[in-house]
Image (spheres, rainbow, N blue to C red):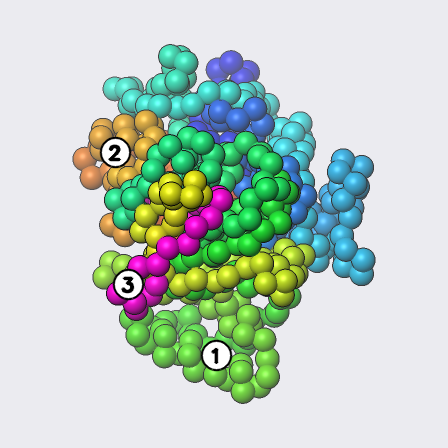
Amino acid sequence: MSTSQAQHVVIIGGGFAGTVTAIKLARATPVPLRISIIESREEIGRGIAYSTRLTTHLVNDPAKNFTLYADQPEHLANWLREQASARDGWQPPAGVAWADAFAPRHLYGDYLQDELENTLAQAPHAIEFRHVVDRAIDLERASDGRWTVRLATGLGLQADRVVLATGLFTATLGRGDLDIDPELIAEGRVVDDIWASAPNDLSKDQDAVIIGNGLSALDAMLSAHAQGFRGHFHGISRRGLLVARRHDATPWPPFLDAQALPTTLRSLLRQVRSAHASILDAGEDWQRLTGAVRPHVPALWNQASDAERKRFIRHLRAYWEISLHKAAPESATWLEALRQAERYSKLTGRVRRIARAASGRIAVTWQPRREARARIVEVDRVFNSRGFEFDWTRIDDPLLRQLVARAYVVPHSTGFGIDAVSHTGAVISKTLDTHGLYAVGHPLRGVNWESNAIGEQLAGATATAQALALSLQPALAVAA
């Protein structure tokens, strides 16, 4: 069969999840295939995470944990050894092995692009691949079961299968809980999207507020430093947590029984606290606890009731994420130096209002935790580092709005992403036959809680690619 007669798989989104799905599908397909990735950026394999060109924006895990191939743990390390210095002049810090290195994120984007190119060239069957530089704004199901993907330019792509790899959407300011002067955003003095903002000269700024204290906040501060900021950062977050340094800590011996996992958050916490106490009593690293719990997260999440999931999101999500998503050692060292120089203040509370002060600066009104009286801090710049929005009913994107309106997707009951079959990513609709529609990565946050992390995204994209490959060959599907 020539590729002109081959079935067509359209992947909407060309960040990590979409690119890896294409790689895994090209390797697994039992027949010639056409694959199109719709991605508005000029380059695929980058998305928000890997589009940054700052060499201080690092991946948050060592190379040995970010390989695309579970059976080749040294694959990324070997690629970095061969390619990184020639492309970027980057090498690991002295004494750090390539496998233990935390590479600049744009290099990881290069790695994804190289692997896609190599895979397409070596695929067992002919692959016709296209990167469509456009935005998908609508999706329609025809009576013959095929799909039409409508693009912002007015064109339409016919597809036999569609994969929603829509990636991340930033949690913008002014969503009802915050009063903000929009002119400050227009002037660039309030940076609402820290990944999309144009570089500014910040050398004259003396104070800046960072809303949030996770990895996004660290990104914002490193970006500000690269733009000349040498003043004081005021980090404001609801719980006063601060991103920690990642240690190379082996998981604590198993303490959760995979055959009899706790069924309530209370019982889970009881076992976790007991293990944590044992780790501290032994004088060991607390980060060993996270590694012992993480393998059980899919099963714990899958068996939990909606009430238990929502209870986790309300009360424990922030603590789990700050313990799981930690900073590269070099980034953490920079942050520690900032604190030692007394250029960083950690404030616990909520930002309530951002307005122009009489002095001409920015007045940030914030409510300290467990205090009735609000406070005001005057600064020269504000960075929104609250992270990302996962609720499809709140995201201002034409494709997502149409998918919800047409009932092709069902927003997940937790408010995170959409409903789907957990082990394949096949999208679930209450009213329609959505055969041939899949989702990978961030849209599945409510289905598979850690679907936003690299390891889990990789596993999810691989499983979806395998399900797609099986569906593309009816004879194989029948035999299975």
Any part of residue 310 in sight? yes
Q: In the structure shown, which secondary structural element does the residue marked by tag 1 occupy?
A: helix
Residues shaded magenta: 368-392
Frontmost residue, 123 versus 84 = 84
Q: Residue 337: which quarter of the image?
A: bottom right
Q: Which residue is mark 2?
A: 404
Magenta-colored segment: predominant secondary structure: loop
Residue at 59% x, 84% y is 283
Residue 107 horizontal side relative to residue 168, left or right: right
Frontmost residue, 237 versus 398 = 237
Q: Which residue is mark 3?
A: 373
* Residue 276 - label: 1
Any part of residue 57 in sight? no
Q: Amino acid at mark 2?
A: Val
Residue at 51% x, 38% y is 195
Residue 218 horizontal side relative to residue 445, left or right: right
- Expressed as whole percent of the image width and height from the top left, the position of residue 390 reads 35, 44
Q: Is residue 232 above or below residue 136?
A: below
Residue at 68% x, 43% y is 55
Q: Residue furthest left?
A: 431
| Mark 2 / mark 3, whichever is N-terminal | 3
Q: Is residue 192 above or below residue 91?
A: above
Q: Amino acid at mark 3?
A: Arg
Q: In this rendering, which labeled residue sits more in front, label 2 or label 3?
A: 3
Spatial CA distance of label 2 from label 1 is 42 Å
